[in-house]
Image (cartoon, rainbow, N blue to C red):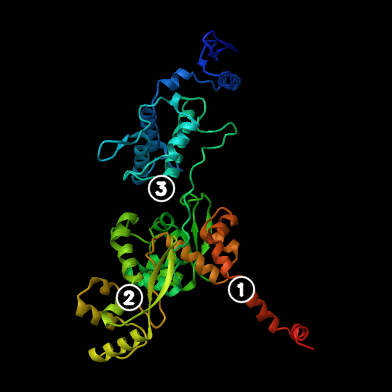
């Protein structure tokens, strides 16, 4: 091999590949030529040499077609092919990478990579393209979208290298590090329900209330909850659920404790089902579909439960108190069950012939529902609320994980126990995600130490004024 300068000022690399065929590519600078020469020498020594002409003859679109076939047949942890829903997600990100976009006036918003040869894909070019990626509406794409597109592109180029279309992914640096992508900002406020709020949400979920309560106290993700089988549950004095490695997002198996009261309800609901039957099945006995469950059950329940105090105040024509909460840096108000609401509830109960109660009852909700003919109130029939209960922000199903973690910390769980519940690979991740919750309990530590000191007379004597 050798590098020489040509009369026209360019630089030529002369080398032979593994089959002793000579090549003479040319470059604009000596540094580029020397870098290329070094790469080819390493490739020939390792036996991984790939003719650069092959990369020039394959476009990114052709690579995606080949990669998609691979994903459909051999993708996933088990190597048996991706689920249709997951493959649809890949199709979406492929569209982001490949397609050209224009605005309503026909002006280009984004130039895609569809017709680009693999040989022309570079780390710098992709980094600049991801950084300037727009949304279809014309504004800048979110950091989340940029991160997903970058990850998709890198996986596709890694596949090209594994198939011998290129020697190595051009998106890796010399140390093998991937292309850095924008990190989505973590929401400043996560929706974390208190136990009364979780019970309210579960009550509003009707027949799926046990699923909601289970997810809210164990922290299992949707994919872990929906595919749960009877054999994964252990009842008795120390009930628990076993999450298998194949369904865990972090690819790590774990055992998560279940509160005894929830375990008893689960055991009764399961009855005599076989070990391979689904714990939370659809009406047809199959695994629940996430989109259908969300649209038909979880989101309607969340909408009804999160504003139940405000709904009751409106029906009783009583003024609630309010509390300020924050979500993603934005201040919002939620209703609080007030003294005025309690008085109005007692007046309503007396007017319709119900016994006075300090909390809402099915009879109260039914009487309000009959008067207003409101399906939301029908969902709230089993919801029990009283003075001081607080509404909450709209919860996603994933927020039940945050709820489980916050309840565990509130119950005194240490960081390793919380890590087990959350299913994080390390305690450092748990601390990073939930640091604010542990900070909230700093003063609780001092309070517990005070309680311990109170039990030791000698310590109290040392601290007493002489």
Give residue 300's quadrant in the image: bottom left
The mark total stands at: 3
Between disc 3 and disc 2, the foreground one is: 3
Res 409 seen here: yes
Q: Earlier in the sequence, mark 3 or mark 2?
A: 3
Taking depth in this image into account, of 383 and 80 the one nearest to the observer is 383
Q: Position of residue 386 (x, y in %)?
A: 38, 82
- Position above or below: 309 against 181: below
Q: CA distance from mark 3 to mark 2?
A: 33 Å
Label number found at residue 310: 2
Could you tell me which residue is drawn at 48 percent across and 65 percent down? 404
Q: Earlier in the sequence, mark 1 or mark 3?
A: 3
* 290 with respect to 431 (left or right): left
Q: Position of residue 90 (x, y in %)?
A: 37, 41
Task: Report which residue position mark 3 lands on.
Answer: 142
Q: Position of residue 136 (x, y in %)?
A: 32, 43
């Amino acid at each position: 091999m050798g590098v020489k300068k040509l009369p026209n000022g360019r630089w030529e690399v002369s080398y032979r590949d593994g089959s002793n065929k000579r090549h003479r590519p040319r470059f604009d600078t000596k540094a580029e030529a020397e870098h290329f020469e070094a790469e080819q020498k390493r490739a020939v020594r390792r036996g991984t040499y790939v003719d650069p002409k092959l990369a020039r003859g394959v476009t990114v679109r052709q690579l995606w077609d080949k990669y998609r076939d691979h994903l459909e047949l051999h993708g996933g942890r088990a190597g048996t092919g991706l689920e249709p829903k997951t493959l649809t997600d890949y199709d979406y990100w492929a569209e982001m990478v490949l397609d050209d976009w224009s605005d309503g006036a026909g002006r280009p918003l984004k130039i895609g990579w569809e017709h680009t040869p693999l040989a022309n894909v570079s780390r710098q070019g992709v980094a600049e393209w991801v950084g300037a990626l727009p949304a279809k509406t014309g504004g800048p794409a979110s950091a989340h979208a940029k991160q997903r597109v970058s990850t998709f592109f890198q996986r596709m180029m890694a596949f090209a290298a594994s198939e011998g279309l290129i020697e190595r992914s051009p998106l890796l640096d010399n140390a093998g590090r991937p292309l850095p992508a924008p990190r989505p900002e973590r929401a400043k406020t996560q929706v974390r329900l208190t136990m009364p709020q979780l019970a309210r949400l579960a009550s509003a979920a009707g027949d799926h209330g046990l699923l909601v309560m289970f997810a809210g106290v164990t922290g299992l993700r949707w994919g872990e909850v929906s595919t749960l089988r009877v054999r994964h549950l252990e009842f008795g004095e120390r009930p628990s659920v076993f999450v298998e490695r194949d369904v865990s997002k972090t690819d790590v198996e774990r055992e998560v404790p279940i509160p005894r009261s929830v375990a008893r309800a689960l055991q009764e609901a399961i009855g005599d089902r076989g070990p391979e039957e689904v714990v939370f099945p659809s009406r047809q006995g199959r695994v629940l579909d996430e989109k259908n469950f969300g649209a038909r059950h979880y989101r309607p329940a969340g909408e009804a439960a999160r504003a139940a105090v405000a709904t009751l105040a409106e029906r009783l024509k009583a003024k609630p108190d309010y509390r300020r909460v924050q979500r993603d840096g934005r201040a919002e108000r939620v209703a609080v069950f007030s003294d005025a609401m309690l008085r109005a509830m007692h007046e309503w109960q007396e007017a319709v012939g119900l016994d006075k109660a300090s909390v809402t009852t099915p009879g109260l909700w039914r009487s309000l529902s009959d008067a207003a003919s409101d399906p939301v109130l029908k969902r709230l029939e089993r919801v029990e609320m009283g003075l001081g209960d607080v509404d909450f922000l709209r919860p996603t199903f994933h927020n039940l994980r945050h709820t489980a973690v916050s309840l565990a910390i509130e119950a005194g769980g240490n960081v390793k126990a919380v890590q087990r519940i959350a299913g994080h690979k390390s305690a450092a991740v748990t601390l990073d995600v939930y640091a604010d919750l542990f900070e909230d309990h700093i003063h609780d530590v001092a309070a517990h130490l005070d309680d311990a000191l109170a039990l030791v007379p000698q310590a109290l004597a040392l601290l007493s004024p002489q």
